[in-house]
Amino acid sequence: MAAIVARDLVLDYEGKRVLDHADLSVEPGEILCVSGPSGEGKSTLLRVLGGLERPSQGSIRIFDRDCDMVRPSPLDEARDDLGFVFQNCALISNMTVYNNILLPLKFRRDRIRANRRVMRSWRLAPSRLPGLGADRMSDRDLAETAEQALRNMLIYDYRNSFPHEISLGMQKRVAVARAMVLNPRALLLDEPTSGLDLLSRQSLVALVSNLNKLRKVTVVVVTHDLDLARTLDARISILSRGKLTEPRPYDRLRELDLPFVRELFAEHLDENGGSDHKMMTDAEISAELRRRGEFSD
């Protein structure tokens, strides 16, 4: 059973065909990076998978469940297994870090309670509802879950801060924490390292890698950063002219005769395919972030 399968996706935007019968398949527990030139529709593809955009044609299955393609929505039962991280983080500016993470927990509980009432009015069995048990969580249960998510992401000290009061690197971690608080089986990330300095970038890469390795989370990343894909040991698919290439490992990417790939290797990587930057260890990253005051002991 594949984690995510998209078939024959078609989507037009302002007269341009963004997705042209595109196919995608992601195996459970793998990391897939989708790259390609700017304006080719990479973020749009991710939004389609997450239920935020409606294609005119195609089908999507998530962990063997069909998605509603007529009225796609992140509320679809099939999409309960997806967490989404926006490029701009999309944190709610007038809410603290803690309340940003608490919000989806409350939303899910209230949604399931409402669904139970509807099913009872139709004399259907509420036990068929997905997420049964979440509706019985007390406010204290939700608070404890949110606090644990803060601790897991090493952002507990920022729980009372507002988004504008923390660095972009911390905002990205908050966005990942919010996406993971409902314990999805797959995580969709849109340009997660965009705008980050080297240290914050490596910290976020380590976080995503640990989620994949320790929690077995399937990851789909949209990125221009091929070095990110290599560091994550991800398969890479290039979106070009509305179609996705067959995913392949980093060391086989040069086989693709595409201008975008040739330009990236020429501009950003040395002749041996190496990176200009040495990847820091987790201990080195943590020590440097503490020195900068972003993590506390």
Image (cartoon, rainbow, N blue to C red):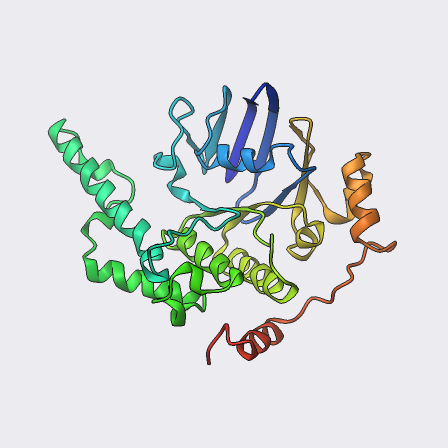
Residue 292: which quarter of the image? bottom right
Image position of 119 (left or right of 86)? left
Residue at 66% x, 70% y is 280
Taking 70 as reference, is 98 above or below it?
A: below
Relative to the observer, which residue lies in front, 294 or 186? 294
Taking 164 as reference, is 24 above or below it?
A: above
Q: Position of residue 247 (x, y in %)?
A: 68, 39
Q: Position of residue 157 (x, y in %)?
A: 39, 72
Relative to the observer, which residue lies in front, 148 or 242? 242
Image position of 104 (left or right of 20)? left
Q: Position of residue 271 (x, y in %)?
A: 88, 54
Relative to the observer, which residue lies in front, 64 or 8? 8
Q: Position of residue 146 (x, y in %)?
A: 32, 61
Taking 274 as reference, is 44 above or below it?
A: above
Residue at 18% x, 57% y is 138
Residue at 54% x, 49% y is 29
